[in-house]
Image: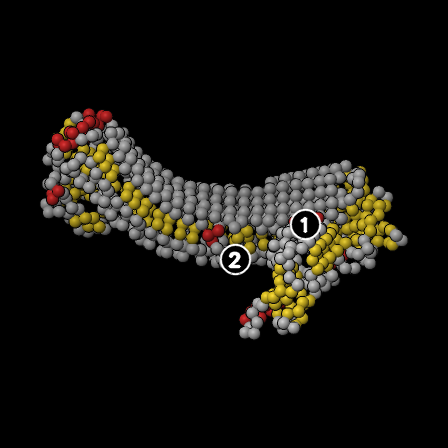
């Protein structure tokens, strides 16, 4: 909508006398824009779904005549039969998507001598291609400029004629303008187009190369364009596969959609010095185009305009370009020479993707917005400094795969949602440092994934979430300072990272699956926050991991949470833990001490499978089930202590045959165990001094800096020295009572 009318509408909505009044006239729906100016917007056609519609210039409502000045967004969404449309002279704008559904529309008649504003692209693509736009006398050039996507634009009385083998249409009899049109058979050889023709005794200026005029003329070898030429419109020279050179005269002002698309042999193009816009896909797939010089008058490069010009090496000029739209130079894989325009404001999706240009830093201060994948796969880009003027980053993956990128400075603040920035630097394998916006509230998904050289990141204080895979495979990252507001570390956030020590702060309440898995340097994890659950594979396959300090609030431990950590010797579960999934400590080949929390009643499937250093295990009375392969491969297991009077349910595969044959089962009720399924496989069953009465079980309470032990028990450090249980440094200690020796971890 035109700003003038938007403001009028907003004012009117705030007035007490009238607020967006809607009404119906002759079956059509209207909305009052301004009561003072007596203007309305057309919002819906008749429900009868007519094939023809004449939109009135004015309508009556409550005894007042209102002028129709606008067509609202998606107004014809329910009309799919419309074939002919007449627009009034009063019309000033047509909003986005107004005619997206009217794909059968063939004839459009407009009475407006000034073309209505259609910057929001209200028509479906099929309409631009198939419909004929009929315009008032003397307005053809104005519509050709502003409604440039239409292939067929005619004034009343237009006619066609063939002169010297070239077909023309006199598109504006009043202005004496003619367009070159297609012919059958197709044009071939060398063509010279004159500046003027005389038809029906009228001398006309050849101003246009019309839509599809030379489309598919594969035998066309050259064309000489006239100095009178104003526009080369939609697909005019598309697929002219033998055309090698195009010299556009200085008079050309419009270069429309697909004009030279897929001209496989095109090597040289001379642009007019006053050209302001190159529309979408104009030179797409011109695979032999090597070097271009853009005029400094140029302001706009349309979507995919030079996409897949795989031989394009250099782009010169164009210093005043303000907008480079989506895919403009995407897949110009040979492009190495291109200066960032000094006036640039907008870089669209994939606009400069998959090229090899090391744009100098900083980017121009005029820059306002960078969209997703804008520089994706630019393998030459080394340093990026984005000015603080650039507040918008729409979409994701702006710098994905920029393998030479080393340093990045992002704006201090941004206005767009950071959560959509996923994979912004994914695969930037040379990236060492990044300055992030101060107002970031999350590190997005895959943000630094596979940034193998990343050494340090200052995470802004306002970040509350580190999203999935955000630091995945950051192999050079040794330390990380978590922000004070952090509440969550999501799925695989630091998987395969180079971290050597992790202290999860007290603010964190959520830790995702695989958060710290497969970290080759990780030695210690300390969780200080009120975390209640650890996801599957949380810290699996960390070959240097020796210490894990779990929070007192922990209740759930996921599958393989600590599996395959070959240096982990002990792990103290808090008694709050009441749900442990299978394979939790599988393959921890150094594990020699473990205490199962009192909240656990079942030893899960394969929980200790392959723990080859485990020599003894104690099942206190709270254990009532031991699952399949729970201790399979525990080849050093020599003593099994069972406190429960009634034997726990034991899966026959819980222990290896060698354990059944060689280990000693210390049971409170030996006879009951000898008779129980599974337990009866033990060859050696006895009542040993290690079996306690329930009342004699040591009650050990561990808190930060202290261990509370039962009467008669003593605390020793790992060097065997007796220590006081108060004011202890963080670490592993041994508690010895009359009957038991237990390792505990002090957080």
Looking at the image, is mark 1 or mark 2 earlier in the sequence?
1
Residue 716 x %, y %: 16, 43
Disc 2: CA contacts within 10 A as few (<14), some (14-19) or many (>=20):
many
In the picture provided, is 547 more to the left or to the right than 674? right
The secondary element bearing badge 2 is classed as: loop
Residue under the point 48% across and 50% down: 421
| Residue 656 percent across, percent down from the top left | 25, 28
How far apart are the alpha carbons under marks 1 and 2?
41 Å
Q: Position of residue 325 (x, y in %)?
A: 61, 51
The one nearer the camera, 339 or 220, is: 220
Residue shown at 16% from the left, 49% from the top: 708
Image position, residue 354 (x, y; %) = 57, 42
Q: For residue 391, which numbered disc appears in the image?
A: 2
| In the depicted structure, whether residue 478 falls above or below residue 390 | above
Crowd around label 1: few <14 · some 14–19 · many ≥20 (10 Å)? some
Query: What residue sits 24% from the left and 29% below the top?
Result: 652
Identify the residue at horizontal 63%, vertical 49% (top origin).
Answer: 303
Q: In the image shown, does 584 or 396 lie closer to the viewer?
A: 584
Q: Quadrant of the N terminus?
A: bottom right
Query: Given contact means CB atoms under 8 Å apart, are the residues at marks 1 and 2 in contact?
Result: no
Q: Which mark is residue 104?
A: 1
The answer to whether one can see residue 202 in this image is: yes
Q: Residue furthest front?
A: 48
């Amino acid at each position: 909508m035109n700003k003038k009318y938007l403001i009028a509408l907003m004012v009117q909505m705030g007035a007490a006398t009238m607020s967006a009044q809607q009404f119906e006239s002759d079956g059509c729906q209207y909305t009052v824009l301004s009561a003072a100016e007596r203007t309305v917007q057309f919002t819906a056609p008749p429900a009868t779904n007519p094939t023809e519609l004449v939109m009135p210039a004015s309508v009556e409502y409550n005894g007042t005549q209102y002028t129709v000045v606008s067509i609202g967004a998606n107004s014809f969404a329910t009309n799919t039969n419309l074939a002919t449309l007449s627009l009034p002279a009063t019309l000033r704008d047509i909003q986005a998507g107004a005619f997206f559904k009217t794909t059968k529309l063939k004839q459009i008649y407009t009475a407006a001598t000034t073309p209505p504003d259609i910057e929001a692209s209200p028509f479906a693509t099929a309409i631009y291609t198939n419909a004929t736009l009929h315009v008032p006398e003397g307005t053809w050039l104005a519509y050709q400029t502003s409604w440039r996507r239409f292939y067929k634009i005619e004034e009343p009385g237009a006619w066609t004629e063939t002169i010297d083998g070239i077909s023309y249409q006199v598109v504006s009899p009043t202005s004496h303008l003619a367009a070159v049109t297609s012919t059958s058979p197709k044009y071939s050889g060398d063509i010279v187009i004159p500046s003027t023709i005389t038809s029906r005794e009228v001398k006309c200026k050849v101003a246009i190369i019309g839509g599809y005029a030379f489309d598919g003329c594969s035998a066309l070898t050259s064309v000489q364009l006239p100095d009178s030429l104003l526009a080369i419109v939609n697909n005019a020279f598309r697929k002219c596969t033998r055309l090698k050179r195009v010299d556009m005269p200085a008079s050309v002002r419009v270069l429309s959609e697909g004009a030279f698309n897929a001209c496989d042999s095109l090597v040289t193009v001379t642009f007019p010095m006053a050209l302001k816009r190159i529309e979408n896909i104009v030179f797409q797939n011109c695979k032999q185009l090597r070097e271009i010089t853009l005029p400094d008058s140029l302001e706009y490069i349309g979507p995919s305009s030079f996409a897949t010009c795989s031989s394009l090496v250099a782009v010169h000029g164009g210093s005043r370009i303000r907008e480079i739209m989506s895919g403009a130079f995407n897949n110009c894989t040979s492009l190495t020479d291109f200066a960032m325009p000094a006036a640039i404001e907008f870089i669209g999706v994939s606009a400069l993707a998959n090229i090899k240009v090391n744009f100098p830093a900083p980017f121009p201060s005029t820059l306002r917005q960078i969209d997703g994948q804008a520089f994706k796969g630019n393998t030459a880009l080394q340093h990026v400094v984005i000015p603080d003027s650039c507040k918008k980053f729409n979409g994701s993956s702006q710098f994905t795969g920029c393998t030479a990128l080393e340093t990045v400075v992002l704006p201090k603040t941004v206005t767009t949602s950071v959560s959509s920035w996923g994979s912004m630097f994914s695969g930037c394998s040379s990236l060492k440092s990044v300055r992030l916006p101060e107002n970031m509230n999350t590190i997005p998904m895959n943000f630094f994934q596979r940034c193998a050289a990343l050494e340090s990141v200052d995470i802004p204080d306002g970040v509350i979430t580190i999203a999935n895979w955000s630091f995945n495979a950051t192999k050079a990252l040794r330390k990380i300072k978590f922000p004070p507001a952090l509440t969550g570390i999501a799925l695989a956030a630091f998987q395969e990272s180079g971290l050597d020590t992790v202290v999860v702060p007290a603010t964190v309440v959520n830790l995702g699956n695989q958060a710290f898995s497969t970290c080759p340097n990780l030695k210690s994890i300390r969780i200080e926050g009120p975390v209640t659950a650890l996801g599957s594979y949380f810290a699996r396959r960390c070959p240097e991991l020796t210490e894990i300090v779990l929070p007192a609030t922990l209740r759930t431990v996921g599958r393989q949470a600590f599996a395959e950590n070959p240096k982990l010797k002990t792990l103290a579960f808090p008694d709050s833990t009441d749900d442990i999934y299978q394979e939790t400590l599988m393959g921890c080949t150094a594990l020699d001490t473990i205490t199962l929390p009192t909240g656990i009643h079942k030893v899960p499937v394969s929980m200790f499978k392959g723990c080859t250093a485990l020599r003894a295990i104690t099942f206190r009375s709270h254990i009532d089930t031991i699952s399949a392969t729970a201790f399979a491969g525990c080849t050093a297991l020599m003593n099994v202590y069972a406190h429960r009077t009634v034997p726990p349910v034991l899966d026959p595969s819980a222990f290896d045959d060698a354990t059944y044959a060689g280990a000693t089962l210390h049971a409170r009720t030996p006879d009951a165990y000898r008779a129980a399924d599974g337990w009866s496989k033990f060859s050696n069953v006895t009542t040993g001094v290690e079996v306690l009465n329930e009342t004699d079980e040591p009650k050990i309470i561990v808190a930060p800096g202290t261990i509370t032990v039962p009467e008669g028990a003593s605390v020793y450090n790992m060097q065997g020295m007796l220590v006081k249980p108060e004011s202890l440094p963080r670490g592993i200690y041994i508690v010895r009572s009359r009957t038991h020796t237990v390792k505990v971890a002090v957080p």
